[in-house]
Amino acid sequence: MDTVAAVDKLFARYAAVLDAGKVAAWAELFDEDSSYAVYCAADDERGLPLAYMLDDCLARIMDRVKFVDEVWRGTVEPYRTRHIFQRTELESVGEETLRAESNVLVAYTGKNDVSGLLCSGRTEDIIRIRDGEALFKERKILLDGTPSRYLVYPI
Amino acid sequence: MSEFTNIQASVSRQFKVPADLPKVIFSDPDIYREELQRIFYGKYWHPVAHRAELTELHSFKTAWLGEVPLLIHRGGDDVVRVFINSCAHRGALLEQRACGKAQEFECPYHRWLFDEKGCFRGAPGRKDFRPDFRDEDYGLRSVRVEEFRGLIFVTMSEHTVSLSEFLGDASQPISDAMLDDGRLTLLGYQRVIYQANWKIYIDNDPYHAPLLHSAFRLLDWQGGAGKLVTTDPEGHMCILYQVQPYKDNGFLKDPSVVEFKGTDDRARVIALRPVTGITKHIDTINVRFARPLGPDSTEVHYAFFGHESDDEEYAKHRVRQASNLLGPSGFISIEDAAIYNRVHATSGDRGYQHFVKGVGKERAEWTQNDEVSNTVWWAHYRSVMGFDKA
């Protein structure tokens, strides 16, 4: 498989597992020394470091899975999602390492609710290719504005 | 007879005691409109910013008090002034940025110019203005401002008591949460919209039983030994306790995010009436600026802070903890978020909410987990809205 196809497969898998509610499978798309974070774009541009979600190591990503699957399940209001990614940049930045950017839209539907737009934004990614398989080393999501509801699941 | 007068009489017949809340007060649009007048534009002080958000001279932030747009500006003289963010001419929104720096404000519609003290400074075509036009009559409207530990409060009423009188015994817990000197630094914001009435938000945010939190059990956090302070007449509610060191029970792969790494173990949770939450918990400092968007919706800006004395490592820890623990998607607070919406979801069923735990006990015996502490506010609300006239 060539590099672009591996990245496409990673993006497709990412959307598919989140939209299927398989958060543990989402965590498997991150490399060993990886990070995941969701920021407000305007605050990020101001240099403010606070995030909506800030998993700066794989252990934190795994803990997020635990909270979604084990801790919050009976309390939070669940919702379905549809993640749409459109890649806008892809370039090599080192041996087996790529930098990507993409736009993202996430639709959501609560139980028996009308569907709506949960959030829009873009991603800044560092991707590693190992044995032909692509994994996220860094995934930074920058939201355009306030999400339509509180976020339960990773974006 | 106004629409509110009709509903006021009906609610008064149902709202017999502050411990039993007729749910209609959370959903009726006429009650909401009246709350804007009596509470949001009435005799209350509302925190709208912290000086840490206005880092330099000439910094500004825009915000809303109910449906009133505000322009909060730190002048070259280091005085914070708050104006109605509306051109004195035809009323266009004067400044549309969320924040920035400016020494004057120009309306794009007819190019009216205002200085940072809100004074009218000129406009094209000035010589053709109406004969009775005087510059001093066309400045920006300002609102009363007071500060406490860097928190900037405003009130729309000329009759509001002084800020210190309004805060009463809540002053000390707020001062504690602002680390005594208020020299905070802004880490950032988490913004969220809850599908809940503003009163449901504040009634269930600072106070709720730890039973809600599955995460507390899994992390072996069970509070309840804290000191409770409630004020009269508004019913500000403050919970004071000590941070307990986290004992790693193996539940988290990365327990560092919940560890207490500071030296100030004062923990504070404050419901500042009518609708602001202030917390200092573990190593996080948080002011929750809330704004009603109607009877069914509340926007909350969770502003998190550090302190000017933080070294790089501690500042980074604060960011990690603040980003993951106590915001709308935080490990702990997400369960609160769910409850606001779930409580509001039933507000149209013509039933009641009830307070039971601790009700009937002497006030001196109230404890942290007694829900009776919220009833001081509800007694005040019932009176202010005229629901005690049955």
Image (cartoon, coloured by chain):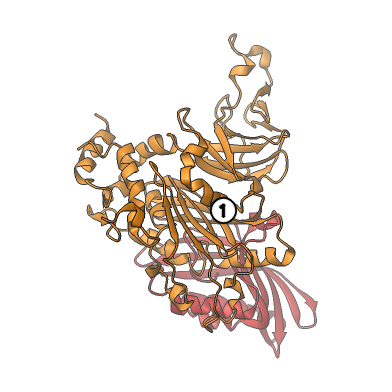
Residue in view at x 56 percent, y 56 percent: B286
Location of the N terminus of chain B (image quadrant) = top left
> Residue under mark 1: which chain is it in?
B
> Can you say which quadrant of the picture contains the C terminus of chain B?
top left
Q: Give the red chain's letter.
A: A
Three-letter code, disc 1: Asp
Residue reaching furthest to the top = B131
Binning the other alpha carbons within 10 Å of mark 1 as few (below 14), some (14 to 19) or many (20 upward) gives: some
Task: Tell me where residue A137 appears, x and y as whole percent.
Answer: 69, 78
SS at circle 1 = helix
Kindly identify the residue that appears in the image at 47 percent across and 33 percent down. B161
Which chain shows up in orange? Answer: B
Tell me if I can see residue B140 in this picture. yes
Q: Residue beneath label 1, please?
A: B176
Task: Tell me where residue B207 appears, x and y as whole percent.
Answer: 41, 58
Most foreground residue, B140 or B309: B309
In the drawing, does residue A146 fall left or right of residue B188? Answer: left
Task: Please tell me whether residue B339 is drawn above or below residue B22 in the rendered image.
Answer: below
Whole-percent x, y for residue B270 in the image: 47, 53
User: To which quarter of the image does residue B370 belong?
Assistant: bottom left
B88 vs B257: above or below? above
Q: Quick check: can you spot residue A9?
A: no
B194 lies above or below B242? above
Q: Is residue B97 left or right of residue B380?
A: right
